Amino acid sequence: ERGAPVVLLDAGERPGGQYWRHAADTEPGGAYGGLWRRLRALTDAGRVDYRPGQQVWLVTREDDGGFRLETTPVHDGVEPLPGPVTAGKVVLCPGGADRQLPVPGWTLPGVVAAGGAQALLKGHGTVAGRQVLVAGTGPFLLPVATGLARAGARVVGVWEANSPLRWARHAPTVLRVPGKVAEAAGYAAALARHRIPYRTRTVVAEILGDDRVRAVRRAVLDGDGVPRSRPEEVEVDLVAFGWGFTPALELPLQLGVATRVDVDGSLVVAVDERQRTDVPGVFVAGEATGVGGATLSLAEGRIAGAAAAGRPEGGRRPRATVRAHRAFARAMHDAHPVPAGWHRWLTDDTLVCRCEEVPHAAVRAAHAQLGAGDARTVKMLTRVGMGWCQGRVCGYAAACLTATLDGRPPTEADLRGTAARPLAVPVSLAELAGPEEGPDRP
């Protein structure tokens, strides 16, 4: 809308990302509907070259200061692009994924990420279980639980690891974002309507079952976040865990941008007020700059797009939205931290890395017996994070465990070691052997 030629590479087959995920035959409404119609109009007018179903697996900076992006289709049914895409500037919006923490029994069928349960419901209308427990920490547990209940699942409870009293010190910040207060009230009403128990300072200490989930054993946390077991077992056939989100930083790190550790312990990209990184021509927006929700991501995207187009007059409203929602995000992360004593519920044989089947005992042995004091060394000695997911599932937990064993919090170097990958997504050997050359795009 500011006159710049744009190529939009979208890993989704429909616009909207994870937040506005919808079925193919559904026409979106509300705020997203307006954005969707604007994108369609710009695409029809030839001002946006929209390429859905395309994942960027490598981005490099050329000698002339421009950028080259290698892409791969999300599946065989999507037509590949004729060649790499080149651009003078790039705006990266890679999003993030559910943060996972290991717990005894978490590899059993019937244990999913909260975001995965929601994606199945939004995208396919599929309820992943009939008797469901939603557990972890953070506001995201609420829409997952209420969505599953509306779809017919019996949600036996929402187990929040923290106390709601942690919000009290952030009341002025919360009141500056009244939409969030109304949203929370709506979810509270939905929980009551569906008779979903909401327990605080409560975690899943163990998941029970043989060939799939049969029940969970709960524990109550003390003031230091250390679990105190209770013998109560709750029968479930699905556990949806939500421990916050981990930003996807493969593409920004390929370009060598500066990073920092955010309030929630995540590694994020450092940007200025125009969403610029320290690499000229590279802008980043959304969860990769700090997890803060859809409204914040939209405002950052608007600012980044205007700045990349050379007309950084994004207006006062987007900048004010970013300030208010970034402050709210900091309050949210402070109110919903990962429990300090979460590692206490691990047993020796609890798998930390499910891909390579690396148990907790192996991580501790690497530190105690082999002197591994950082996540990278533990990875080399135990193969944690070297399996199919390349650390996307276990990387954060492994870095935190290693730092805890070393008596310190995770550092930026620890987290970069688990987040940096030479390839952002899986690609075929044929693509690696020699990507076809084709006409470059603006």
Image (cartoon, rainbow, N blue to C red):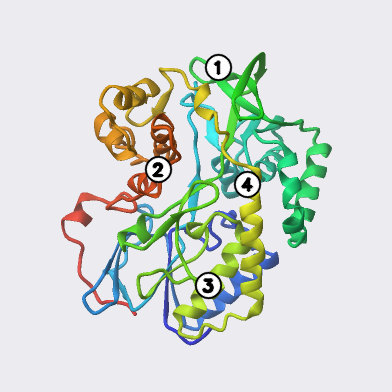
* 285 and 47: which is toward the camera: 285
Q: Are marks 1 and 4 in contact (CB under 8 Å)?
A: no
Disc 2 residue crowd, few under 14, some 14–19, many 20+, Cα 10 Å: many
Report the Cα–Cα distance between label 2 and label 4. 24 Å
Of circles 3 and 2, the one toward us is 3
Q: Say if residue 419 shows up in the picture.
A: yes
Q: Earlier in the sequence, mark 1 or mark 4?
A: 1
- Look at 39% across and 39% down and name the residue there: 395
Residue 334: give its label.
Answer: 4
Report the Cα–Cα distance between label 3 and label 4. 23 Å
Q: Earlier in the sequence, mark 3 or mark 4?
A: 3
Say which residue label 3 marks: 273
Q: Secondary structure at mark 2?
A: loop
* 289 and 149: which is toward the camera: 289
Say which residue label 1 marks: 208
Q: Is residue 417 above or below residue 432?
A: above
Q: Earlier in the sequence, mark 2 or mark 4?
A: 4
Q: Amino acid at mark 3?
A: Glu
Query: Residue 219 is drawn in which quadrant?
Result: top right
